[in-house]
Amino acid sequence: MDIRQLGPDDAHAYRELRIEASGDPAFASNPTVEAAISVDLLKQVLGASTPGEILGAFDNGELLGMVGLGSSEMSERGTLFGLFVTQARRSCGVGRALVRALVSKVSSEPAISSLELLVDASNTAAISLYRTEGFRAEKPDASPLRMSRAV
């Protein structure tokens, strides 16, 4: 498995994965919205020089999963968002590898000292993954659950 930053050449596969993800209740979108987003727009987004980025996990050229990093020059906190692994490759370590790759990347950026994320409190599999990767709930009774970790 290869994990790397997505670029404009990955726009078609990224769009297809986003459409699949939008059918998952844990993902904050819907298939109609995602299907309306053009490949050309995603090429622009993936090619833009913005503070954030999207990492993708590939196996033999197939995009298996994704995770995003959002950041701001006004904050020392980065935001992990949009972690999704295609249904066929869940429970195979793809999500864990994506989280670890993102944490490793952020660790080399001195402007970011911590990562945060939001996760639905009922998504026990995701919460378990995040906890094993060092994330802790800031307010354990909240939903969505805000988790963070130092990097």
Image: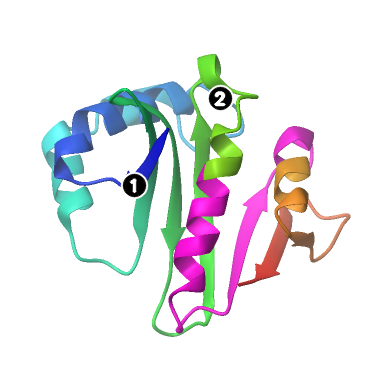
Tell me the residue that label 1 is attached to: 4
Quadrant of the image for the N terminus?
A: top left
Q: CA distance from mark 2 to mark 1?
A: 24 Å
Q: Is residue 117 above or below residue 25?
A: below
In x, y percent, where is residue 48? 18, 59
Q: Residue at x 45, y 74 (%)?
A: 108
Q: Secondary structure at mark 1?
A: strand
Callout 1: few (<14), some (14-19), or many (20+) C-alpha neighbours within 10 Å? Answer: some
Q: Which residues are magenta?
A: 98-126
Looking at the rendered structure, the kind of residue marked 1 is Arg
In x, y percent, where is residue 20? 43, 21
Tell me the residue that label 2 is attached to: 24
Q: Residue at x 52, y 82 (%)?
A: 76
Looking at the rendered structure, the kind of residue marked 2 is Asp
In x, y percent, where is residue 47? 16, 53
Q: Is residue 71 above or below residue 101?
A: below
On whether residue 119 falls in the magenta region, the answer is yes
The front one of 94 and 1 is: 1
- Residue 109 is left or right of residue 16, and the answer is right
**Residue 15 falls in which quadrant of the image?**
top left
Q: Residue at x 77, y 51 (%)?
A: 131
